[in-house]
Image (cartoon, grey):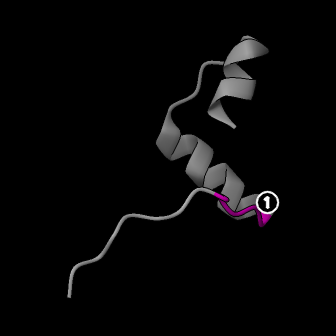
Amino acid sequence: MMKQLAMQGVAMGRYKVTRLMAEAGLMSRQPGKHRYK
């Protein structure tokens, strides 16, 4: 999503994008970080 916004000329950090995606009910399709036991 950040790449799409950058191509449209909108500068935004990853944390703001994450917050806006959460507000819109969107989820990342990229796998999350591995959590060790």
Segment tinted magenta in the rendering = 25-29
Picture layout, residue 17 above or below residue 27? above
Q: Secondary structure at mark 1?
A: helix
Query: Which quadrant of the rendered structure holds the N terminus?
Result: top right
Q: Give the residue drawn at x 77%, y 67%.
A: 25
The answer to whether residue 24 is above or below residue 37 is: above
* Residue 27 position (above or below residue 35): above
Q: How many marks?
A: 1
| Residue 29: quadrant of the picture | bottom right
Asked whether 12 falls inside the magenta stretch, the response is no
Quarter of image, res 23 = bottom right
Which residue is under mark 1? 24
Where residue 37 appears, as percent x and y from the top left, is 20, 88
- State the image quarter where residue 9 is shown: top right
Q: Is residue 36 left or right of residue 6?
A: left
Outermost residue toward the bottom in this view: 37
Q: Residues within 10 Å of mark 1 (few under 14, many from 20)?
A: few
Q: Position of residue 26 (x, y in %)?
A: 76, 61
- Image coordinates for residue 12, horizontal then vertical, percent: 58, 27
Residue occupying image coordinates x 65% and y 58% = 28
Closer-to-camera residue (29/6): 29
The reply, left or right, for residue 9 in relation to residue 30 is: right
Q: Position of residue 16 (x, y in %)?
A: 55, 42
- Looking at the picture, which amino acid does disc 1 mark? Ala
Magenta stretch, overall SS: loop
Q: Residue at x 60, y 19 (%)?
A: 11
